[in-house]
Image (tube, grey):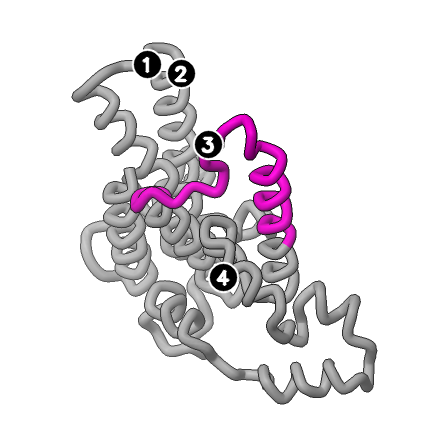
Amino acid sequence: MLGAYLVTFLVTRLITSMIRDGRGPFRDTTLGGVHVHHQVYGIFLLLGAGTAELTYRPGSPWVQVIAVLFGIGAALTLDEFALWLHLDDVYWSAEGRRSVDAVLVALVVGALLLIGANPLADSSEESAPAAALAIASNLLFAVIAIGKGRTLLGIIGVFIPLVALVAAMRLARPGSPWARRMYRPGSRRLARSSRRFPPGRRNRWDRIVDLFATPRSAPDEVPVPHRSGRTDS
């Protein structure tokens, strides 16, 4: 599933870039004048794969086929996450970067599950209350980290408790929900946050997102109407 997810995302971004730049044989798909986004194919694949797994519970090799189909569907759907969020075609805009964020976060979660990380690991009956308290505390730290604008660390922290604790204790980003609610205007903490995260500052995560979310064309180029970079398969 994870392999199909990663390959599909990379191929999809390559094809959409080619469509946007007018290169190659690929074109947007339209039915009756309606543009069909590639998340439509992804949603149907997710529905089909999930229904097949829950209905038939197949063994090998069909369970692997379903896993591949689910991975493909998840990549196609999450690659247009920003469209769900904004209900608008923002694929190559600044808002469209949220799609890449969603894809990469899901990839990190999948990789952690693949190596055996499990935030809800089974525990003995005797230790169940302590385990429940530990899980609840860790999830609280992860939510705080995400609220502070440290989304990746918060997600990883769901699986690795120490990461969630450290991320929750760090300074919030200026525009994060935590900073807007907890850092009063003119406060020392807001000033520290603004110095730590000045406008335009780019971290390693931003640079990774840039690899997939930044069009190959010049940044100030006006997008051509109805050429938003969509797959036709």
From the image, tell me which residue sits under label 1: 57
* Residue type of the residue flagged with mark 3: Asp
* Residue type of the residue flagged with mark 4: Val
Q: CA distance from mark 2 to mark 1?
A: 6 Å
Q: Are marks 2 and 1 in contact (CB under 8 Å)?
A: yes
Front one among 93 and 202: 202
Q: Nearer the viewer, mark 3 or mark 4?
A: 3
Q: CA distance from mark 1 to mark 3?
A: 23 Å
* Residue type of the residue flagged with mark 2: Leu
Q: Write down the region rendered in magenta.
A: 113-140
Secondary structure at numbered mark 3:
loop
Q: Are marks 2 and 4 in contact (CB under 8 Å)?
A: no
Q: Nearer the viewer, mark 2 or mark 4?
A: 4
Q: Quadrant of the C terminus?
A: top left
| Residue 164 drawn at (x, y percent) | 54, 59
Q: Are marks 3 and 4 in contact (CB under 8 Å)?
A: no
Secondary structure at numbered mark 1:
loop
Q: CA distance from mark 2 to mark 4?
A: 34 Å
Residue 122 circle label: 3
Residue 54 circle label: 2
Q: CA distance from mark 3 to mark 2?
A: 23 Å
